[in-house]
Image (tube, rainbow, N blue to C red):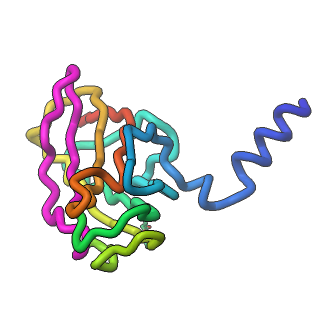
Amino acid sequence: MFLLVILGLLCCSSNLVWSATPFKDCGSPSGTIQLFEVTDCTTVPCKFIKGHTYSMNLTVQAKAPSATATVALHGIIGGIPVPFPIGEPNACKLGAKCPIASGDANVVSFSLPVLSSYPAISLYVKIELVADDQKNDYACLQFPATITS
Ligand SMILES: *[C@@H]1O[C@H](CO)[C@@H](O)[C@H](O)[C@H]1NC(C)=O
């Protein structure tokens, strides 16, 4: 009972926690991921319905400067990373204030169109925000998802 109360407090004490999408950090040498949100996904696996577009907000605090940053999205299908096209990969045009200085927190907003031609499978989605000048990632995160009709 006591545990339930604690869990309840943890889960619902903040809107931020409530709307966040759980993820695994896959190595973010140049930054710290502060928040990640995917439309309609507060528990994983995220359910992606074909024909829908899902928007994502990634909040990252930089630990190193970079003139520009780039978003890369991969689906990991049977262990193989497959690039997923997003319309605009330039983070400076997706909400980040460029050049990015060490200590800056930026929200990068982008969207993933789930095309009807995609197969109905379970996969991991890997998202990177690359600090172009550092040649490594401000953020690397991964979460499981299922694509359905
Ligand atoms: C992303 O942030 C914008 C602006 O704050 C908000 O309107 C939108 O709902 C957010 N999207 C998600 C998926 O949380």
Q: Is residue 112 left or right of residue 64?
A: left
Q: Splitting the image into 4 quarters, where does residue 118 fall?
A: top left
Quadrant in the picture for the C terminus: top left
Q: Is residue 65 above or below residue 119?
A: below
Could you say where residue 111 lies in the image, as x and y percent from the top left?
26, 59
Q: Splitting the image into 4 quarters, where does residue 65 fall?
A: bottom left
- Residue that sits furthest to the top in the current view: 78
Query: Who's the residue at 30% across and 51% down the image?
Result: 137
Could you say where residue 143 lies in the image, as x and y percent from the top left?
39, 37
Q: Is residue 74 magenta?
A: yes
- Closest to the observer, 68 or 135: 135
- Residue that sits furthest to the right in the current view: 2
- Residue that sits furthest to the left in the current view: 117
On the rendering, which quadrant does ligand 1 occupy? Answer: bottom left
**Numbered marks: total:** 0
- Closest to the observer, 47 or 22: 22
Could you say where residue 123 lies in the image, as x and y percent from the top left?
28, 29
- Closest to the observer, 133 or 83: 133
Query: Who's the residue at 31% across and 42% down the image?
Result: 48
Q: Is residue 93 left or right of residue 140?
A: left
Quadrant in the picture for the N terminus: top right
Query: Who's the residue at 16% across and 56% down the image?
Result: 86
Query: Magenta segment, which residues?
Result: 70-93
Q: Splitting the image into 4 quarters, where does residue 25 fall?
A: top left
Q: Is residue 117 magenta?
A: no
Query: Who's the residue at 33% across and 66% down the image?
Result: 109
- Closest to the observer, 75 or 26: 26
